[in-house]
Each structure stands twice: as structure tokens, then as C-alpha cells.
Amino acid sequence: MKLKAKGVKFIIKCLFVPVEDISVSLIKHNIIDAIVIKSNKGAGKVHTSDIPIFRLVRKAKHLYPNIHIIASGGIANSEDIQGCLKAGATAVGLGTVFAMSKECRISLESKARVLANKNIVSIDAVGLPQNGIVFEKHEGWDNENNSKALEKGVEGKGGHLLIGHAIHQINEILSVEEIVKKLVPEG
């Protein structure tokens, strides 16, 4: 509670725990400020449930009406954003759309390789599977996160890049400003 008194916000990321199993006592005692609900279509570690993100958000908002809900994973376009907000999300988390931006540190060569191969695979990771695009395995492959090698471009060691469902909506490398304009049309 000392941290809360200093303005620290507590956010629980719901990866593999069903939303109804989140500790009610933490919510009842006003410890949790927000819950991140992640779909199985997101990048990185994901759960194995096939429940659509909109239903997960709706269920969480119903169970915890006074908690902020952040939708994350598989959110690819403005329709997905609006669907999550209509379902009760306070905010959305976007990853893949910005990972493919001009400003992201992943090399342009690696981004071009991603755009040429949008085959997302489940990477066998400890604890939970991860969604990603595998370029090539290499010595020292850790089966967790080889994205650092991809910052170096095609000369890097290969590995994989954690990518989510949004990759299927991306056809070119744009700036963050251009991406935001596409996601949040004026009007």
C-alpha cells in the first residue's frame, strides 16, 4: 500500500489465468488499477484459449466493472480498436503495428523479411507458447526471444521476431505518425 500511496499503479497482465480467476481479494482491497486482457493472436507469450478478444474484454468488464481493462494482442486495425472499446476496454495495447514502424530499432532488412513471410508460428517456449516469425535457428538459439539479432539485419544471427496477428494487415513500413493516422481516422 505504500507504493499506491506514492501514485504507483498496479496492472495485472492476464496471459493464461482465466479472467474469472483473477484474485478478487486484490480487487476488493483496491490494489489492482487495471487488467491487461491478451488474446491468443498477440505477439510474445500467449494463452491457448480461442475466445475472441472482444468476448474476453466484455467478460472482464462485467466481472470487474470498476477496474480499467486494457485489451492487447491481435489488435490490427481501427475496427479492432473500436470493437475493444465498445466491449468495455478503457485502452488498447498495440505492438506489432509499431514494431513494423520506421522508428522501430528492428532493421529495415528484417522488416522486409517479415513482410515477405507472414507465416506466424507457435514457438515452443517455457511456460507458454509464443507467436512469432522464425527466420532461422542458430547456435545459441534460446527459444525465447532472439529479436535483438534482428536489429542487426540480414547480417545478424537470424532467430525469430515476436509478431502478432496484426502483421496480416501490414503491407508497408510506415512512420508511427502514418500508422496512427490510419488507426485513428480524423472525423
Image (cartoon, rainbow, N blue to C red):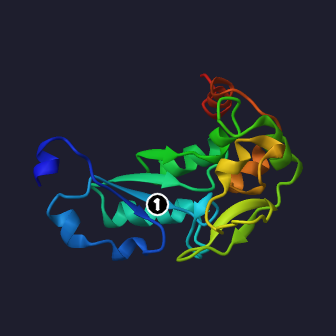
Q: Nearer the viewer, residue 117 or 150?
A: 150
Extreme front residue here?
139
Extreme right residue here?
116
The residue carrying mark 1 is 37
Would residue 79 appear left or right of 47 to someone viewing this image? right
Q: Residue at x 81, y 49 (%)?
A: 114
Residue 137 point in image, percent of width and height:
79, 65
Label 1: state its secondary structure: strand
Q: Nearer the viewer, residue 78 or 113?
A: 113
Q: Nearer the viewer, residue 110 or 17?
A: 110
- Say if 98 sits above or below 15 in the image: above
Task: Name the amino acid type tagged 1.
Answer: Ile
Residue 154 point in image, percent of width and height:
83, 45
Q: Residue at x 65, y 29 (%)?
A: 103
Residue 106 point in image, percent of width and height:
69, 40
- Image quadrant containing the N terminus: bottom left
Would residue 22 appear left or right of 160 to someone viewing this image? left
Q: Dividing the picture into quarters, in which one does residue 110 lie?
A: top right
Q: Residue at x 67, y 64 (%)?
A: 131
Graded by Cα atoms within 10 Å as few (under 14), some (14 to 19) or many (20 or more), the crowding at tag 1 reads many
- Image quadrant containing the C terminus: top right
Total number of numbered discs in the rendering? 1
Residue 5 point in image, percent of width and height:
11, 45
Q: Nearer the viewer, residue 148 or 60?
A: 148
- Say if 26 sits above or below 49 in the image: above
- Say if 138 sits above or below 187 in the image: below
